[in-house]
Image (spheres, grey):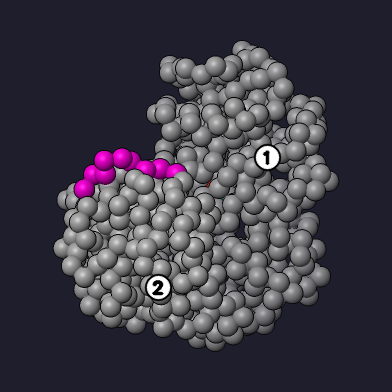
């Protein structure tokens, strides 16, 4: 959908661009992300422009640069971190390596409190800093309106042209009054109001126009996104112009197929076909060990099944059908759709075949502009039951991304100089470090309490920062001492899938009963191909708190619940060890692969 008078976030490479856009939308204005070098001409209908942070130095020759023409559009501009530095440099000021690198909390002192963007902010507030470079001289016409102990130009303004810049990150929760500041900036922009209600009103017409007299064939996974997308399309086009397909991949959660089928039945949606393709998927995954290969194969297999069923049912493009997908906004960016967002993982909705169909206009994605919490709001508007809408997000490739595959044990030479019993694990996992993808080892801590104390949580932050060998820190909840690890090569099989399904189901039951399901964004349960006996496996508990999955905090599991989970997991045939993942994102991703 075209959105006039919205606020554009130009992406200079930080993973935080999404957080900024979400914060703007929370102020009731539509916001989207575009490439840093988008020509000013294409931005002239924007109500405001925000320049995101990014990991590079503005004075490096390869660093992302915007079009300085944006400063002549008479549109308010707000630069954050790298965005501030690029603005300053583009307008004739200077940026240099800072004398002190500033990471974490700082005290911001505001001056000139009569400037509109500072309305209702206190004279002093705690802000979150993360920068090595700093502004050393301001362009003409700019003034300083805030500083910290280590940053002379922490907040600058050119009030006549409504240009503002901050060195700190107002979009993160650690910055006090960050949302108020963003709201102040938004109120300076002449933006049109936006909310999910107005979205629903407009999306109906937009979908009807895009679809024309075609019909929609849609893959449904049981997850929140595809469920909401499917119900939305059904409501807009009517059930006779829609056909759903739920493919049982053999990598679904326990009772998933049953639950989803029943939920649609209750909504009066009877156009969902359930196809058991588990043998087909698992056959394709024999001896596949690379996480990215696995994603591609699963994506391809979905497509083949979908193609076969659509031919059988006469639902092909030639017969006037389009493919519907439940892709949401962050999915389109983490795959690297804006140039400066590094590819972290390939999303299964963005494999080349789908991309080709998209270019030819055969794919419709009604949620592609929305964030997860907006999708949930929409689900409620559509009358979906609370429990379904508030289910934790679940990845499209299902348990497939949680069954860690490896052909051989991965040895780790490096040790850590820490005063706590620990061991590097014989497997690697994906992480995200410095806006890029990392593939490194996990280290586990062992204590007699078998419950993470403050020291363990601190190490979870400090180890990945200090060591280039480890990107994850775990706590062993089943063993007090380091046992001998026995590695068994493993790929995705029905046996491993069944084992993980049971493990996942019991963890979710205990979490639900202990009353902390609603506090958790997502709780992946991961199966690792090593244990303490031949063929034995390990389980990693990975509960996180998050808002958009772009960043996440490892969550605390109440002690009794953790002990109960560990005990029940160890009673499953084939599970030898249990760990809790204490790593935040970054540096660890939410999923392990
Ligand atoms: P990460 O692991 O990158 O995950 O921190 C961020 C969010 O994306 C989900 N995820 C996926 N979802 N297909 C999906 O539909 C995938 O291939 C995929 N990989 C990760 C993950 O569960 C989390 O919510």
Instruction: Classify mark 2: residues with Cα within 10 Å, few (<14), some (14-19) or many (20+).
Output: few
**Among numbered discs 1 and 2, the one appearing first in the sequence:** 2
**Picture layout, residue 140 above or below residue 409:** below
Q: Say if the magenta span includes residue 52.
A: no
- Nearer to us of marks 1 and 2 is 2
Instruction: Classify mark 1: residues with Cα within 10 Å, few (<14), some (14-19) or many (20+).
Output: some
Q: Say if the magenta span includes residue 102.
A: yes
Question: Is there any visible trace of residue 50 in the rendered image?
Answer: yes
Question: Is there any visible trace of residue 294 in the rendered image?
Answer: no
Q: Residue furthest right?
A: 513
Percent from the top left, x then y, of residue 490?
58, 29
Mainly helix, strand or loop, the magenta region?
strand
The label number, if any, that marks residue 114 in the structure image = 2
Q: Splitting the image into 4 quarters, where does residue 215 fall? A: bottom right
Q: Secondary structure at mark 1?
A: loop
Say whether residue 368 is left or right of residue 225.
Answer: left
Q: Secondary structure at mark 2?
A: loop
Say whether residue 308 is left or right of residue 16.
Answer: right
Find disc 1 in the rendering and name its residue.
556
Percent from the top left, x then y, of residue 438?
42, 37
Q: Nearer the viewer, residue 563 or 57?
A: 57
Q: Nearer the viewer, residue 82 or 368?
A: 82
**Picture layout, residue 279 above or below residue 314:** above
**Picture layout, residue 94 above or below residue 453:** below
Measured Cα–Cα span from mark 1 to mark 2: 43 Å
Write the residue at 42% across / 29% down: 466
Q: Splitting the image into 4 quarters, where does residue 534 fall? A: top right
User: Which residues are drawn in magenta?
Assistant: 96-104
């Amino acid at each position: 959908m075209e959105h006039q008078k919205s606020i554009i976030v130009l992406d200079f490479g930080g993973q935080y661009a999404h957080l900024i856009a979400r914060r703007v939308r929370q102020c009731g204005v539509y916001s989207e992300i575009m490439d840093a070098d988008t020509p000013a001409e294409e931005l002239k209908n924007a109500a405001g422009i925000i320049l995101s942070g990014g990991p590079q130095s503005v004075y490096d020759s390869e660093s992302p640069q915007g079009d300085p023409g944006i400063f002549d559009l008479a549109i308010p501009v707000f630069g954050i971190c790298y965005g501030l530095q690029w603005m300053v440099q583009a307008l004739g000021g200077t940026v240099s390596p800072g004398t002190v690198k500033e990471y974490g909390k700082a005290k911001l002192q505001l001056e000139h409190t009569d400037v509109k963007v500072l309305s209702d902010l206190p004279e002093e507030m705690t802000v979150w800093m993360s920068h090595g470079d700093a502004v050393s001289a301001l362009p003409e016409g700019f003034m300083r309106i805030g500083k910290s102990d280590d940053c002379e130009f922490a907040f600058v303004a050119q009030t006549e042209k409504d240009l503002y810049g901050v060195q700190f990150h107002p979009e993160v929760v650690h910055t006090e009054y960050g949302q108020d500041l963003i709201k102040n900036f938004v109120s300076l922009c002449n933006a049109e109001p936006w909310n999910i209600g107005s979205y629903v009103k407009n999306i109906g017409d937009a979908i009807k126009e895009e679809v024309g007299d075609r019909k929609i064939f849609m893959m449904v996974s049981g997850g929140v996104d595809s469920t909401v997308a499917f119900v939305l399309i059904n409501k807009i086009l009517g059930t006779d112009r829609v056909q759903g397909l739920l493919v049982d991949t053999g990598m679904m959660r326990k009772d998933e197929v049953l639950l989803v089928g029943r939920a649609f039945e209750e909504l009066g949606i009877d156009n969902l076909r359930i196809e058991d393709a588990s043998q087909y998927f698992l056959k394709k995954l024999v001896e596949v060990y690379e996480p990215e290969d696995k994603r591609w194969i699963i994506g391809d297999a979905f497509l083949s099944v979908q193609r076969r069923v659509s031919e059988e049912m006469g639902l092909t493009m030639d017969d006037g059908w389009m493919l519907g997908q439940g892709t949401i906004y962050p999915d389109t960016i983490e795959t690297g759709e804006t140039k400066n967002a590094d590819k972290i993982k390939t999303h299964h909705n963005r494999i080349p075949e789908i991309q080709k169909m998209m270019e030819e206009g055969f794919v419709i994605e009604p949620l592609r502009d929305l964030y997860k919490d907006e999708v949930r709001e929409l689900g409620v508007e559509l009358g979906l039951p609370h429990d379904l809408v508030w289910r934790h997000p679940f990845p499209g490739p299902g348990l497939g991304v949680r069954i860690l595959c490896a052909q051989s044990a991965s040895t780790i030479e490096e040790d850590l100089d820490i005063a706590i019993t620990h061991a590097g694990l014989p497997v690697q996992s994906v992480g995200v470090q410095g806006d890029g993808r990392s593939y490194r080892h996990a280290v586990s801590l062992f204590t007699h309490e078998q419950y993470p104390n403050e020291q363990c949580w601190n190490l979870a932050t400090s180890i990945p920062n200090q060591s280039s060998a480890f990107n994850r820190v775990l706590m062993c909840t089943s063993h007090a001492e380091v046992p001998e690890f026995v590695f068994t090569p493993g790929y995705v099989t029905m046996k491993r899938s069944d084992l993980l399904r049971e493990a996942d189901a019991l963890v979710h039951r205990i979490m639900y009963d202990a009353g902390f399901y609603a506090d958790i964004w997502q709780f992946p349960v991961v199966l690792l191909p090593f244990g303490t006996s031949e063929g034995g496996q390990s389980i990693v508990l990975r509960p996180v708190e998050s808002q958009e999955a772009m960043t996440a905090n490892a969550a605390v599991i109440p002690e009794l619940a953790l002990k109960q989970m560990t005990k029940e997991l160890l009673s499953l045939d084939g599970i030898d060890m249990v760990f809790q993942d204490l790593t935040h994102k970054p540096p660890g991703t939410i999923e392990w692969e």
